[in-house]
Image (cartoon, helix red, strand yellow):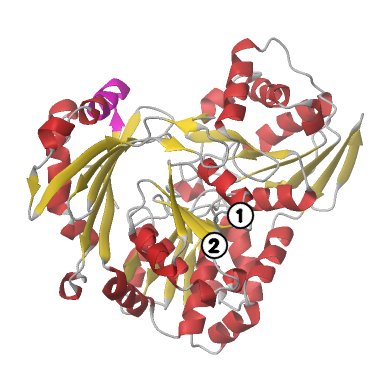
Amino acid sequence: MRKKVDVFQQPHYVANFTQAIVNALSPEQRGRLVVGGDGRYFNAEAIQVILKVLVGNGIREVLVGADGILSTPAVSNLIRKSKADGGIVLSASHNPGGPGKDFGIKFNNASGSPAPENITQAIYDQTRSISEYQWADLPELKLEAGSEYTFLDTKIRVVDSVDDYAALMQTLFDFDRIGDAIRSGGLSVCFDGMHAVTGPYARRIFGDLLGVSQDRLWNCDALTDFGGGHPDPNRVYAKTLYDFMMGESATDLGAASDGDGDRNMIMGRGAFVSPSDSLALIAQHHQSIPQFKSGLVGVARSMPTSTALDRVAQHLNISCYETPTGWKFFGNLLDQGLVRLCGEESFGTSGDHVREKDGVWTVLCWLSILADKQVSAQELLAQHWTSFGRSYYCRHDYEGLDADKAQTIIDQLAGAKGKLLGRKMGAMSVADVNVFRYEDPVDGSVSENQGVRVVFDDHSRVVYRLSGTGTDSATLRVYLEQIERDAQNQGADAIVYNESLGQFANDIADIQATTGLSEPTVKT
């Protein structure tokens, strides 16, 4: 659940929602829970309330991050390592934090994955009927690493926020090889923590363990308001890093992560790496990453993510699954061993080590590839595009829309196949218009109405979907993908290259006529 922080600050609100989570769990799932958040405004106060409710409900053991801090992938790891029954994550991901800004609470299941739809529906149903919550009148707890408390039937253990996650990373990557490349000067790195939760993780992993100098670890003090910025690692909100990496003083790798540590932005010297290309390149060069030495078996991407991954999977002769947006849809595929690498369009990538997307891990993947291949990120991109074609890919966001008008756009597109078939956009023609429907290959569950796809005869696409990450109004996301197979035309900026397709997408969906917006709010 994601709302403005003022909503969560209402009396009893956090307690009621926490009780609804507990009520949705069976008695067998109330043994051990993990609690942690991204440190945004109201994180500390909410955790104190959550602990009181969990003790009041007799949860046997609670593991909580020091000072209430755990990145989202670190929560997933801790759930899995401790064999917990689940975890409560406090975050609004990449949304702004501070008074009047955004806050969120979600539940992850025992695999470390975001709760599937049947659990989230059960929690929601509880919120509609709840009449009381269980409460233990605890003192204010000092959440210092190593502290232990026992109240009634509950033990509370405070764990270091970084230790377990850093230890996991050292089992997945060759830290000696990466560190040698960095310390020798053969691989230079700059990381922007965006004053968010990954700051402490970056200082430990990139700084202490790998030798990146502290002056190349920017904005790594985690602040409750993210320093007044928008902790979304893209070319708009991480513009300082983007400008640096496009300038003469750029390092070999530039990266950023978001509010709760699950998203990433990757750049090379003079080169922006789209999330879709990042995912495809990690798949292509997976043998450079110790975690994947035994092979990938299969990969997965969210539906709006570009089809670059599909072409790599075909080359590797492995399965590529297409899921709705939302990391929870990868959970069954990962748990069944059908895939080992997955990613989504909104700067999220991860492997089978946790059940969340993982920003720091993605940076380590790129460091592994660069240390092994000893070529620049720009050269890697050029080689990839020559071999597989380039998906010129970008996203146009139309923010702050009236929800009814945004839904009208989607509904009209869903029924527009007849009038759009054969319509030209440059040399391309519309070959299909469809509404994405997903049937989970593991449990057979079905997710309807997951976005509208306009597919061209050369497999280029426009995808429309409504975002579920905002706390007020609606955001229409429009994903543009043009596939360029001529190596002579693969070096342009994706946003510039897709300008005509973006206007085409606006026109066929009647976005300007419906909303008054002739241009997107954000292009990334």
Q: Quadrant of the N terminus?
A: top right
The percent coordinates of residue 442 (x first, y second) are 56, 41
What residue appears at the point 78 percent right and 29 percent down from the top-left corner? 54
Quadrant in the rendering for residue 107: top right
The residue nearer to you, when weighing 177 against 338, is 338
The percent coordinates of residue 343 (x first, y second) are 46, 54
Q: How crowded is mark 1: few (under 14 residues within 10 Å), some or many (20 or more)?
A: few
Q: Is residue 182 above or below residue 219?
A: below
The residue nearer to you, when weighing 12 against 272, is 272
Q: In this view, does 92 lie above or below 268?
A: above
Q: Tag 1: residue type?
A: Gly
Q: Is the magenta stretch mostly helix, strand or loop?
A: helix
Label 1 – label 2 distance at C-alpha: 8 Å
Q: Mark 2 points at which residue?
A: 297
What residue appears at the point 66 percent right and 75 percent down from the top-left corner? 209
The percent coordinates of residue 111 (x first, y second) are 68, 45
Q: What element carries label 2?
A: loop
| Farthest residue, direction bottom | 184
Q: Which portion, as a residue range, is magenta? A: 400-410
Q: Tag 2: residue type?
A: Val
Membership of 226 in magenta stretch: no
Is 190 positioned to the left or the right of 134 in the image?
left
The residue nearer to you, when weighing 282 against 478, is 282
**Visible in this render: residue 246?**
no
Q: Mark 1 points at which residue?
A: 337
Of labels 1 and 2, earlier in sequence is: 2
